[in-house]
Amino acid sequence: MITVERSFLVELPLDELITYLEDFGHAEEWDPGTVRCVRIDDGPVRPGAGWQNTSRFRGRTTDLVYRLDSRDSHELVFVGVNKTVTSTDVMRFEARSASATHMSYTASLRFKGLARFAEPFLRSEFETLADKVAERLPSAAEAR
């Protein structure tokens, strides 16, 4: 399994940041690997809500179906699945002031079948992608 984690400050109140990020469709704005992310069900965003996510990695596109696994006042958990990988994204939040939130973002990828043998060769690329998310997410959220 590959796990990457980044922490950073976002100049938004905690509730506003969680509201923005709980709609995984916004991943197009903050995740440089996401090409397209579209809601696949209706109704309010709540645990169980789903998105079809298309990402580009190493020049190839791949699709995962993401679900909001859990949501509380300080954490969001998304799980994305396809035939070769299960991705778990955990976002934790702590208010630092009325207008700023400290966020930690952890992405864990568990590869399936033969794809798991590629993990040692992919780790550095996922570290680089995590750096780009940490760079892009605060400004994308603050622009909302």
Image (cartoon, rainbow, N blue to C red):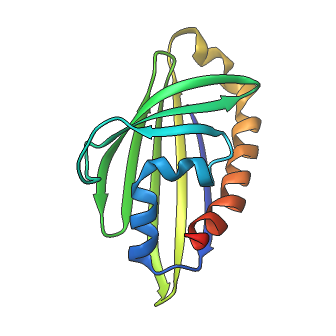
Q: As displayed, is residue 113 above or below residue 28? A: above
Question: For this view, does 61 lie left or right of residue 42?
Answer: right
Coordinates of residue 19 in the picture (x, y in percent): 39, 66
Residue ID at (46%, 15%) = 83
Figure disc tally: 0
Quarter of the image for the C terminus: give it.
Answer: bottom right
Coordinates of residue 71 in the picture (x, y in percent): 30, 57
Q: As displayed, is residue 25 above or below residue 11? A: above
Is residue 124 or residue 19 the one in the foreground?
A: 19
Coordinates of residue 122 in the picture (x, y in percent): 72, 29
Is residue 62 or residue 92 the one in the foreground?
A: 62
Coordinates of residue 32 in the picture (x, y in percent): 68, 46
Is residue 119 or residue 97 the one in the foreground?
A: 97
Residue ID at (50%, 17%) = 112
Residue ID at (45%, 63%) = 20
Is residue 127 or residue 42 the one in the foreground?
A: 42
Q: As displayed, is residue 74 above or below residue 76? A: below
Quadrant of residue 102 in the image? Answer: bottom right
Residue ID at (25%, 54%) = 44
Spot the residue most to the bottom.
98
Q: As displayed, is residue 95 above or below residue 28? A: below
Quarter of the image for the N terminus: give it.
Answer: top right
